[in-house]
C-alpha cells in the first residue's frame, strides 16, 4: 500500500484535541431522583458483573477516535497498485517535447500528468525490480539506467522540465529498443502525446511565423496564425516591442484547421526586436508568442574600393554577416559603410564614418605617412590582436613602402627595422595599413591570409558572431567567437546568465528551452558587443494537440509483445475508508444518540 | 382540603369502591362485620348442645323434634374491624410526575371512606415524618371530612426508619394494617411484616412507585441526587445500564413479593399513575 498525500497525517493532531474536549465535556448533569436505592443495587451489580464497565463508558470516545483515524487515512489517499509483472525492469520513457507543455486541465500539463504517473510507478516497484528513466525530445537522454534506488529516481523525475523542443518519438525507438533488450524481463511504459490516447486531444491556436521589414523608421510586419482547433476562432493578435509596449493590434477570424497571414503596416518601430502575441489563452501557451529580430541592425557593410582583388573578395565573402560592396570609383564613396577597404586607391577626402583597411596606398594620408619603395623580404609577424593564430606564419613580399611610426599606431608586420604593416586608432577611427601589394607577395597563398582577413574584420568592425538569428527552442546556438574574445555570456529570456567556455571555431549553447529573445554578450579586450537571437516554439511539429498524428506512429515489432501502454491497476482505498467511517458514524448515532 | 388530590373525580370514584377483605375477627367492638365470635346478631351461625345455664329461649325445638335432643342456636357476633393505615411520609414519596404521595393520600382516604361506610374503624398513621404527627381515627362517615383535611395537611419530608416507627406502635388486637410506601427503606421488610403478623395484623402492602422509577427515561452523564439523603452518584447512562436497572428492579420487587408471600401478606404493586379503583380491584 502507498500513500499519495502524506500531508494528511497532520490531521492526526486532531485526536488529542478530541480527547481533550471529551475530558472537558465530562460534566454530569444534576438529576434529582427519589432514592438512590435501586441505582446503588444496579451499579453495584453491574460493576461486579462486568469488568468492562469503565471501558464501555468510554466507547463513545473510542468510536470517535476510530472515525477520526479512518478519515485521516482517507485524506492521505492510500492506494494499492497491482503490477502485472512484479520483478520486471521498468523502462519509463517520458516525452518532454513542446506539445507536452499543453495543459491537460487547468492545473496540470501533459508532462505533469506523465511525471506523476511515472513517480507512482517507481514508488510501487517491488524491491527486486529495477528501472530506467529516459526523456525524449529532440534527443534522447538516459537519466538513470537499471537502478533500484527509488528515492533517486523520484528526485530525478521531479527535476524534469519541459524542453519545448521538436520531437519525433519514432526517431528514438531504436535507441529505446536497444536499451530495453539489455534485460530479459522488462516492461516498457511510454508517456508521449504522439504515441497513444493517454492524453486527451486539445484545441490550440498557434503563431507560426513572423516577418519584419524595415522602411526607415516604419516596420511592415506579417504574422502567420494557424487554428488547430475543431471550432472557428475569432482572436486578437498584438504586436509589442521589447518593453511590451503595444505597437499594433488586429482581430482575425479563422476557420478550424486553417491558417491565415495577418499584415501590420507602417508600425513605428526602431528597436532591436519585437514579438507578436495572441491575446486569448489556450491549452498551449508557448506557441501564442513569436519573436523576431530587427536584422537590419546586425548586418555589417563593407565597401571594397579596388580595380580587382580576387583574394580579398573571396576571403571576405567566406565570412558571414558581412555585406560586401565593390567599387572602383573613388569619387562616389558615401558614408553608409562600416568598413572601407582601399586597395591602392585612396580618396583625398576619406569618409567621415566607418573604419579603414588600407592596402598598398599610393600616398600618405592623415592616418599614416609612407616612405619610398624599397626591396622587400620575409615578413616578420609581430604579436598583436590581429596576429592571433598567425605568429608562425611566414611569407615574402617583393617591395614595400616603409611606414613612418606614429604614436597612435602599432607594428603588425616588419622586415628588419622597417614597418610593413601597422594598425591603430586615429581620432576614434580604427585602421589597418599594409604598405605592400598583396599581389606581389605570397601572402594570399599563405594559410594565414584568411585568418588575417578575419582578424582584421573583427578588429575593424563589430561583426556578428552569431550566425543564426532565428532558431527553434531546443536547437543549439552556435557562436563564432571573435579572435580576442575574453568572455561569452548568454542571457536567456528569464534573465538567467550563462558564462560559456570559449571554443574555436564555434562555441555552443544548448540551454534553449525557453521561447524568447536570448542576448549573446561577447566581451573582448577593447569592447563589449551584444547580439540577439530569437528562439521560437516549433509549431510545425508541436502545436497540433488533437492526437491526429498518433496513428502515424508505429512501434517496433520487437517490443510490441511487451507491455507498451502504462497500466496502473490502482485501488484507491480512500473511498473504502470513507464508507467505513460513515458506517461507524451511523452506528454511533444509532447506539448512543438515538438511544 | 387539597383540591388537586381530592377532586370531584376522586369522590365520584369513592362511591364505587368496595373492600374485599375479610379479616378474622373475634374480638373488638361491635360492628357490622361478621366475626367468628358468637354473639347476639340475627344471623344464624351454628348449633350447640344445650347445657345447664344456656338461654333456653335459644333452644331449637325443630331440631329437638327431629333428633330428640336439645340444641341451642348460635348467632354470629358482628364485630367492628380496625384498619390501620401506615402512610410512608418520607421525602422519596414526594416524587414523580404522578406524585406517589398523591396516590398514597388518595388510597388512605379511600380506605377510610370504605371502612367507615362498613362501620369499621380506621386509624391513619403517618410514619417517617420529619416532625411528629399524631394519628387520626375515623369511625364514622361524618369524620371523613376531617380525614380529608388531615390527609391534605400531611407533609412528605421524612427520612427515618419505617420499622422503628411501626415497632413503637402498640396493637390492641387483630386488624388490618395497610402500608402505603415506596419501600425505599433501609429496614428489612421481613422484620416489619413479621412484627405486624405477630400482632395479628392482616397486612396489605401497597407498593407505590412512579413511572420514572419503574422505567427511567434518562440519558447521558448524570449526577443523581437522592431527594432524601442528598447523596450523589455519578453515572453514565447507557442502554446496558438501563437494562441492568430493570433487572435490579425486577429482583427487588420479587424479593418484596416473596417476603409478602412468606408472611401471608397481600402485595399490590401500584404505579402512581394507576387509577385508584384498580388498586381496590386487585385486593
Image (cartoon, coloured by chain):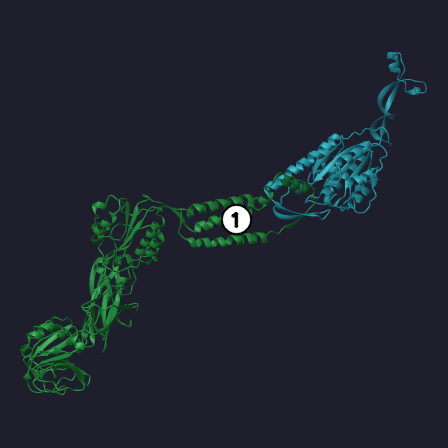
Looking at the picture, does residue A572 appear above or below residue B248? below
Left or right? Give the position of A372 relative to A224. Answer: left
| Quadrant of the image occupied by residue A475 | bottom left
Residue at left offset 6%, top offset 77%: A441
- How far across and down, in percent of the image, does residue B239 sit? 59, 42
A34 or A325, nearer to the observer: A325
For label 1, the SS is helix
- How far across and down, in percent of the image, does residue A468 sit? 19, 67
Looking at the picture, does residue B27 appear above or below residue A588? above
| Quadrant of the image occupied by residue A163 | bottom left
Looking at the picture, does residue A282 appear above or below residue B189? below
B160 or B233, nearer to the observer: B233
Residue at left offset 14%, top offset 84%: A351
Where's the C terminus of chain A, which quadrant? top right
Residue ID for mark 1: A64
The chain ID associated with circle 1 is A
- How far across and down, in percent of the image, does residue A546 sit? 25, 54
B26 or A323, nearer to the observer: A323
Q: Can residue A517 be seen in this view?
A: yes
Left or right? Give the position of A47 relative to A577. Answer: right
**Rendered shade, chain A:** green
Left or right? Give the position of B189 relative to A120. Answer: right
Residue lying at the far front in this picture: please name it. A416
**Rendered shade, chain B:** cyan
Q: Can residue A238 be seen in this view?
A: no
| Quadrant of the image occupied by residue B193 | top right
Residue at left offset 24%, top offset 60%: A165
- Bin the neighbour count of mark 1 within 10 Å (Cα to Cα): few under 14, some 14-19, many 20 and up: some
Amino acid at each position: 500500500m502507498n500513500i499519495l498525500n502524506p500531508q494528511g497525517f497532520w490531521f492526526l493532531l486532531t485526536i488529542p484535541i478530541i480527547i481533550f474536549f471529551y475530558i472537558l465535556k465530562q460534566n454530569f448533569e444534576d438529576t434529582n431522583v427519589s432514592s438512590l436505592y435501586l441505582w446503588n443495587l444496579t451499579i453495584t451489580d453491574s460493576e461486579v458483573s462486568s469488568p468492562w464497565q469503565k471501558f464501555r463508558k468510554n466507547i463513545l470516545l473510542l468510536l470517535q477516535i476510530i472515525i477520526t483515524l479512518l478519515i485521516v487515512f482517507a485524506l492521505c489517499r492510500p492506494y494499492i497498485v497491482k503490477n502485472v509483472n512484479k520483478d520486471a525492469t521498468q523502462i519509463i520513457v517520458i516525452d518532454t517535447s513542446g506539445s507536452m507543455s499543453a495543459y491537460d486541465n487547468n492545473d496540470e500539463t501533459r508532462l505533469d500528468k506523465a511525471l506523476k504517473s511515472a513517480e507512482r510507478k517507481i514508488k510501487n516497484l517491488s524491491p527486486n525490480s529495477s528501472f530506467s528513466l529516459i526523456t525524449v525530445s529532440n534527443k534522447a537522454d538516459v537519466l538513470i539506467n537499471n537502478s533500484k534506488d527509488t528515492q533517486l529516481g523520484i528526485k530525478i523525475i521531479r527535476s524534469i522540465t519541459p524542453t519545448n523542443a521538436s520531437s519525433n518519438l519514432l526517431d528514438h525507438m531504436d535507441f529505446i529498443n536497444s536499451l530495453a533488450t539489455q534485460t530479459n524481463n522488462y516492461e516498457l511504459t511510454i508517456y508521449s502525446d504522439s504515441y497513444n490516447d493517454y492524453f486527451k486531444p486539445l484545441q490550440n491556436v498557434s503563431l507560426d511565423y513572423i516577418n519584419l521589414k524595415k522602411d526607415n523608421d516604419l516596420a511592415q510586419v506579417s504574422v502567420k496564425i494557424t487554428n488547430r482547433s475543431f471550432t472557428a476562432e475569432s482572436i486578437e493578435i498584438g504586436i509589442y516591442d521589447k518593453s511590451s509596449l503595444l505597437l499594433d493590434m488586429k482581430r482575425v477570424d479563422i476557420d478550424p484547421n486553417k491558417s491565415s497571414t495577418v499584415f501590420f503596416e507602417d508600425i513605428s518601430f526602431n528597436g532591436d526586436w519585437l514579438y507578436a502575441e495572441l491575446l486569448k489563452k489556450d491549452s498551449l501557451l508557448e506557441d501564442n508568442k513569436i519573436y523576431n529580430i530587427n536584422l537590419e541592425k546586425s548586418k555589417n557593410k563593407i565597401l571594397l574600393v579596388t580595380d580587382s582583388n580576387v583574394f580579398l573578395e573571396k576571403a571576405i565573402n567566406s565570412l558571414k554577416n558581412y555585406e560586401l560592396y565593390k567599387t572602383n570609383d573613388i569619387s562616389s564613396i558615401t558614408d553608409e559603410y562600416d568598413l572601407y577597404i582601399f586597395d591602392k586607391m585612396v580618396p583625398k577626402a576619406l569618409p567621415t564614418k566607418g573604419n579603414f583597411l588600407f592596402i598598398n596606398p599610393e600616398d600618405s594620408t592623415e592616418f599614416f605617412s609612407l616612405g619610398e619603395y624599397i626591396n622587400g623580404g620575409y615578413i616578420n609577424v609581430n604579436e598583436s590582436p590581429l596576429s592571433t593564430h598567425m605568429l608562425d606564419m611566414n611569407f615574402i613580399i617583393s617591395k614595400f613602402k616603409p611606414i613612418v611610426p606614429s604614436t597612435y599606431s602599432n607594428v603588425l608586420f616588419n622586415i628588419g627595422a622597417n614597418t610593413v604593416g601597422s594598425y591603430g586608432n586615429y581620432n576614434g577611427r580604427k585602421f589597418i595599413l599594409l604598405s605592400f601589394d598583396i599581389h606581389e607577395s605570397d601572402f594570399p597563398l599563405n594559410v594565414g591570409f584568411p585568418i588575417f582577413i578575419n582578424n582584421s574584420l573583427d578588429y575593424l568592425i563589430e561583426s556578428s558572431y552569431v550566425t543564426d538569428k532565428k532558431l527553434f527552442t531546443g536547437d543549439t546556438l552556435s557562436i563564432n567567437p571573435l579572435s580576442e574574445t575574453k568572455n561569452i555570456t548568454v542571457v536567456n529570456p528569464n534573465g538567467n546568465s550563462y558564462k560559456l567556455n570559449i571554443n574555436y571555431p564555434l562555441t555552443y549553447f544548448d540551454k534553449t528551452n525557453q521561447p524568447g529573445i536570448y542576448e549573446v554578450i561577447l566581451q573582448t579586450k577593447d569592447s563589449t558587443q551584444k547580439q540577439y537571437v530569437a528562439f521560437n516554439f516549433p509549431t510545425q511539429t508541436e502545436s497540433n494537440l488533437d492526437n491526429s498524428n498518433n496513428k502515424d506512429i508505429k512501434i517496433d515489432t520487437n517490443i510490441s509483445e511487451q507491455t507498451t501502454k502504462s497500466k496502473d491497476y490502482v485501488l484507491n482505498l480512500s473511498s473504502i475508508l470513507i464508507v467505513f467511517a460513515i458506517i461507524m458514524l451511523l452506528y454511533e448515532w444509532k447506539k448512543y444518540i438515538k438511544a | 382540603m387539597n383540591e388537586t388530590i381530592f377532586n370531584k373525580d376522586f369522590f365520584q370514584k369513592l362511591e364505587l369502591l368496595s373492600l374485599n377483605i375479610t379479616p378474622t375477627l373475634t374480638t373488638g367492638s361491635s360492628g357490622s362485620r361478621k366475626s367468628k365470635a358468637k354473639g347476639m346478631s340475627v344471623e344464624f351461625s351454628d348449633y350447640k348442645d344445650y347445657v345447664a345455664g344456656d338461654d333456653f329461649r335459644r333452644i331449637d325445638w325443630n331440631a329437638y323434634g327431629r333428633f330428640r335432643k336439645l340444641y341451642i342456636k348460635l348467632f354470629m357476633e358482628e364485630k367492628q374491624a380496625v384498619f390501620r393505615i401506615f402512610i410512608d411520609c418520607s421525602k422519596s414519596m414526594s416524587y414523580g410526575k404522578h406524585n406517589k404521595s398523591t396516590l398514597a393520600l388518595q388510597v388512605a382516604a379511600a380506605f377510610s371512606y370504605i371502612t367507615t361506610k362498613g362501620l369499621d374503624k380506621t386509624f391513619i398513621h403517618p410514619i417517617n415524618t420529619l416532625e411528629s404527627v399524631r394519628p387520626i381515627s375515623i369511625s364514622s362517615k361524618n369524620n371523613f371530612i376531617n380525614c380529608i383535611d388531615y390527609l391534605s395537611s400531611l407533609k412528605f419530608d421524612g427520612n427515618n426508619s419505617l420499622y422503628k416507627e411501626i415497632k413503637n406502635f402498640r396493637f390492641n388486637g387483630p386488624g388490618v394494617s395497610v402500608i402505603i410506601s415506596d419501600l425505599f427503606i433501609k429496614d428489612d421488610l421481613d422484620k416489619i411484616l413479621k412484627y405486624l403478623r405477630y400482632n395479628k395484623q392482616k397486612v396489605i402492602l401497597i407498593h407505590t412507585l412512579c413511572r420514572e422509577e419503574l422505567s427511567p427515561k434518562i440519558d447521558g452523564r448524570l449526577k443523581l441526587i437522592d431527594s432524601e439523603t442528598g447523596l450523589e452518584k455519578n453515572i453514565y447512562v447507557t442502554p446496558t445500564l438501563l437494562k441492568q436497572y430493570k433487572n435490579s428492579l425486577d429482583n427487588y420487587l420479587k424479593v418484596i413479593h416473596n417476603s409478602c408471600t412468606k408472611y401471608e401478606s397481600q402485595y399490590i404493586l401500584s404505579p402512581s399513575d394507576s387509577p385508584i379503583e384498580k388498586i381496590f380491584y386487585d385486593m
